[in-house]
Amino acid sequence: MNVLANRQRGHDYDFIIIGSGFGGSVSALRLSEKGYKVLVLEKGKRLTEKDFPKRNWSLKKWFWLPAFRFFGFFKITWFRHVTILSGVGVGGGSLVYANTLPVPTPEFFKAPSWAHLADWEKELGEFYPLATKMLGAVQCPRLEIGDRALKTLAEQIGKAEGFEPTKVAVFFGEPEKTVPDPYFNGRGPERAGCVFCGGCMVGCRYNAKNTLDKNYLYLAERHEAVIQAEAEVYDVVPVGKADGSEGFRVKWRSSTALFKKRGEYTCSGIVFSGGVLGTVPLLLKLKQTSLPNLSDKVGSHARTNSESLMGITTFDKETVFSDGIAISSILHTDEHSHLEPVRYSAGSGFWRLLGAPLAQGRNVVVRMAMVIFDLLRHPVKNLNVFFIDDWAKRTQILLYMRTLDSAFRFSRGLFGMKTEAEMGVRPTAFVAEAGDLAKRYAGIVNGKPMVLLTETLFGIPTTAHILGGCVMGKDRNEGVIDKDNRVFGYRNMYICDGSMISANPGVNPSLTITALTERAMSQISEKSRYV
């Protein structure tokens, strides 16, 4: 279909895309390939290998905290029901994610929350392989100590067949050797082979990680798309008719300058791709001001992958967990649950500041009592954990994920967004199976399981996979967008990012966001047909 058949001439751009993560980057390439004049506005900075920190103690290079003049690419946001880890910068979450790209199990496609809209397994059948190819995902070629321990765990619990290497977006050429583009027939940038340093989530300094600035965004710029970094959008106003059919005025301000530079552009169509923490708060604000026709479901049906994050610190000084890539194996404990070993590069021990003994209980009093008991029972082990020579070398993080039909709602509060329980079981940091698996794993590697202190104190789970808030529906009473990602109530307006995910995938969602956006962009006709 043609979303711009009646587009008004004289706009600065045909499409403006807000955000440059997995949804925004796909949109930028596919729309520019179709002949549209495209602008991408990204709040974060454009970073190169030299800008990434060697370890996560370099807080100014790692964290995104503009108020403190920290202009990194990693962000932590706390809410009542969840703590969210996310990425900021040209390339969005790809800069900080663990480059793992699994296809969800069939249960995801058949979830009642969106299965009535389409046969999703069939609809996405051609787009998952396309996304996999574009992101350069291949099976990890080697297993590390932490992976072999996971394989042993799989055998212990009778799930040996559930263990497998991950598919990851990494170039496994000769380590550090630079070669011409190996992915796009020479049209992409030069690449260098992975050195297996474990630094994927601290920013790849070796040009081996297939971040979005090395595929979709790079190719989009070759098709004359414009990427403007350090530009935070704060308003979107229809031009002419209220439904946006005559275009939009997009207002932005500098996200890094001490004295806020401002500007605005007009466009015929717009794609919101700022991720849950960008798109949802912006649309909640605009619904009360310049975009009142947005669905009342903005902010609803937000989800996580029901994760538990646990660190297993070994007391064996010969064991090194930091070698490898961020995630190189996965164990499917059943059809609903998955366990992955996650690693940071040597020296990246920031998380040790937030560690606490594994304690699961119904309230903070019970949990703190368990922590105190653990400290008294194992004083030497706990001291060893906190003062270990190199936390990243000696600690294997375990990421447990499961498919769980629950959701919460984002809404506007006095100091920004807030959350409230909406459907199903409230997100929790304490999953019995996850705790049991962590203890078993600790036994295998001669280690001690730890969790984040914030989880112990407040019972709030931590997620790197925040999803939903602008989900699909058959109409505006059920969702914010239709099955083709078009926003109800407006013309030529799309949402393509994690906020569109309408069910819990139970695994890392980046490939799914990419595939869904590929499908959405495939519905838009080439501009040349209407010029």
Image: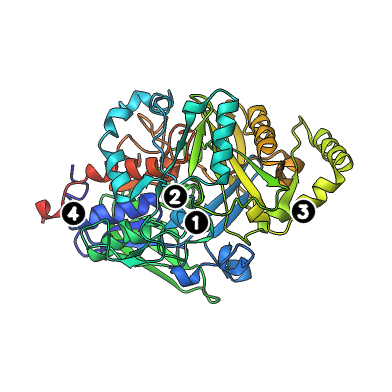
- What type is the residue that disc 2 sits on? Asn
Q: Which residue is mark 1?
A: 200
Q: Which residue is mark 3?
A: 386
Q: Which residue is mark 4?
A: 34
Marks 3, 4: nearer the viewer: 3
Q: Nearer the viewer, residue 344 or 253?
A: 344
Looking at the image, tell me whether mark 1 or mark 2 is earlier in sequence order: 2
Looking at the image, tell me whether mark 4 or mark 2 is earlier in sequence order: 4
Measure how far apart labels 1 and 4 are at the Cα level.
33 Å
Measure how far apart labels 3 and 1 are at the Cα level.
24 Å
Looking at the image, tell me whether mark 3 or mark 4 is earlier in sequence order: 4
Q: Quadrant of the N terminus?
A: top left
- Residue 337 x %, y %: 53, 29
Q: Nearer the viewer, residue 423 or 315?
A: 315
- Answer whether labels 1 and 2 touch (C-beta < 8 Å): yes
Which numbered dot is residue 99?
Answer: 2
Q: Nearer the viewer, residue 517 or 100?
A: 100
Is 259 on the left or on the right of 173, as rendered?
A: right
Dot 2, how many residues are within 10 Å of its Cα: few (below 14), some (14-19), or many (20+)?
many
Looking at the image, tell me whether mark 3 or mark 2 is earlier in sequence order: 2
The residue at 35%/47% (across/down) is 137
- What type is the residue that disc 1 sits on? Cys
Is 110 on the left or on the right of 157, as rendered?
A: left
- What type is the residue that disc 4 sits on? Lys
Measure how far apart labels 3 and 4 are at the Cα level.
55 Å
Q: Secondary structure at mark 3?
A: helix
Measure how far apart labels 4 and 2 are at the Cα level.
28 Å
Dot 3, how many residues are within 10 Å of its Cα: few (below 14), some (14-19), or many (20+)?
some
